[in-house]
Image (cartoon, helix red, strand yellow):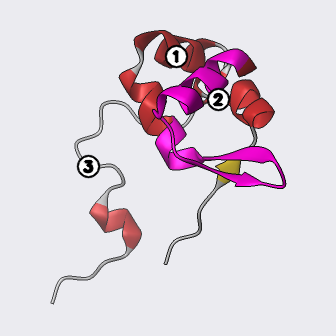
Amino acid sequence: MKPVIRLSVSEAAKMFGISQRTVRRAIQSGDVTYVVVQGRYKINFESLLRWSQRTTTVKNKRDNQGIGQYVDQWKISGKLYSPNPQSLGEEED
């Protein structure tokens, strides 16, 4: 069972570089899954990420102002296999 990551409305807005109002609209339209904890929305991070990939405006803001601006540092370009299976130390029998 994998752990579920949940964010508040303000955390989601900061992380994705969008307004809290945009996050609340996604909640009201049913685009993201959430639970209410002590009267506050806790949004499922996985559904938030899927929603941001489907919505062009949110995707652009996520990539330019939100967490996506740091992802380019993690990407490996020009590699056939990433990571290289030989570098993982897997032995063939």
Q: Secondary structure at mark 3?
A: loop
Q: Amino acid at mark 1?
A: Val
Q: Which mark is residue 10?
A: none
Q: Is residue 19 visible?
A: no
Q: Earlier in the sequence, mark 1 or mark 3?
A: 1
In the image, is 89 to the left or to the right of 66?
left
Q: Residue at x 63, y 25 (%)?
A: 23
Q: Which residue is mark 2?
A: 67
Whether tag 3 and tag 2 are in contact, CB under 8 A, the answer is no
Q: Which residue is mark 3?
A: 81
Query: Distance of mark 1 from mark 3, alpha carbons?
Result: 30 Å
Q: Amino acid at mark 3?
A: Tyr
Residue extending furthest right? 38
The residue closer to the viewer here, 23 or 15, is: 23
Query: Distance of mark 1 from mark 2, alpha carbons?
Result: 12 Å
Badge 2: residue crowd in 10 Å (few <14, some 14–19, many ≥20): some
Task: Please give the range of residues in magenta.
Answer: 21-48
Q: Residue at x 64, y 29 (%)?
A: 67
Q: Residue at x 39, y 69 (%)?
A: 88
Badge 1: residue crowd in 10 Å (few <14, some 14–19, many ≥20): many
Position of residue 44 measured from the top left corner of the image (x, y, whole percent):
58, 49
Query: Any magenta on residue 28?
Result: yes
In the image, is 2 to the left or to the right of 11?
left
Q: Which mark is residue 58?
A: 1
Query: Distance of mark 3 from mark 2, alpha carbons?
Result: 25 Å
Q: Quadrant of residue 89?
A: bottom left
Query: Any magenta on residue 22?
Result: yes
Position of residue 48 measured from the top left corner of the image (x, y, whole percent):
53, 37
Position of residue 59 measured from the top left corner of the image (x, y, whole percent):
48, 18
